[in-house]
Image (cartoon, helix red, strand yellow):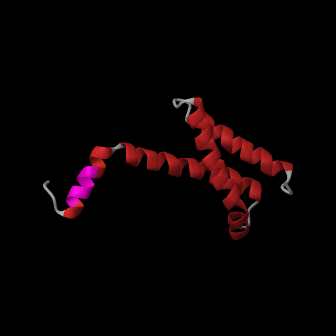
Amino acid sequence: MSKGWEYWIALATGLLIVIERHKQARFSSRVLIAMISGGFGHVSAPEVASLTGRSEALSVMVLTGLGYLLIDLAAGIIADRKTIVDLARSFLGGRK
């Protein structure tokens, strides 16, 4: 817990943005997605901050949002089964 208060406010802000952006889902799903996104941001922030020369507070908020975007993209791809099947068929040389 050696992070400054700015870091924790930035992390909380990122989590609240994720929860708000996913308001159509059940609350438990929103919390789970926010926790995963926040975990991604929290774990990655020190390394990204040192590589970019920016603060950890900025890095954690940006990475939390990026984590959300990656989860949302993956969920969207998985949910579109017809497209996945069509891509697999074309990749494997199946009917068109």
- Report the quarter where the C terminus lies: bottom left
Identify whether 66 is placed above or below 50: above
Residue 46 vs residue 81, the one in the foreground: 81
How many dots with numbers? Answer: 0
Identify whether 13 is placed above or below 61: above
Q: Residue at x 23, y 62 (%)?
A: 91
Residue 6, percent from left and from top: 82, 49
Identify whether 90 is placed above or below 14: below
Q: Residue at x 62, y 42 (%)?
A: 34
What residue span does the magenta drawing correspond to?
85-90
Prevalent SS, magenta region: helix
Q: Is residue 16 magenta?
A: no
Q: State which quadrant residue 49 falls in.
A: bottom right
Q: Is residue 87 left or right of residue 34?
A: left
Residue 79, percent from left and from top: 38, 43
Q: Residue at x 59, y 33 (%)?
A: 28
On the question of residue 21 being in view, the answer is no
Q: Is residue 7 left or right of residue 26?
A: right
Q: Residue at x 85, y 48 (%)?
A: 5
Q: Is residue 16 left or right of residue 4?
A: left
Residue lying at the far bottom of the rendered structure: 51
On the question of residue 38 being in view, the answer is yes
Residue 7, percent from left and from top: 79, 51
- Report the quarter where the N terminus lies: bottom right
Identify whether 55 is placed above or below 21: below
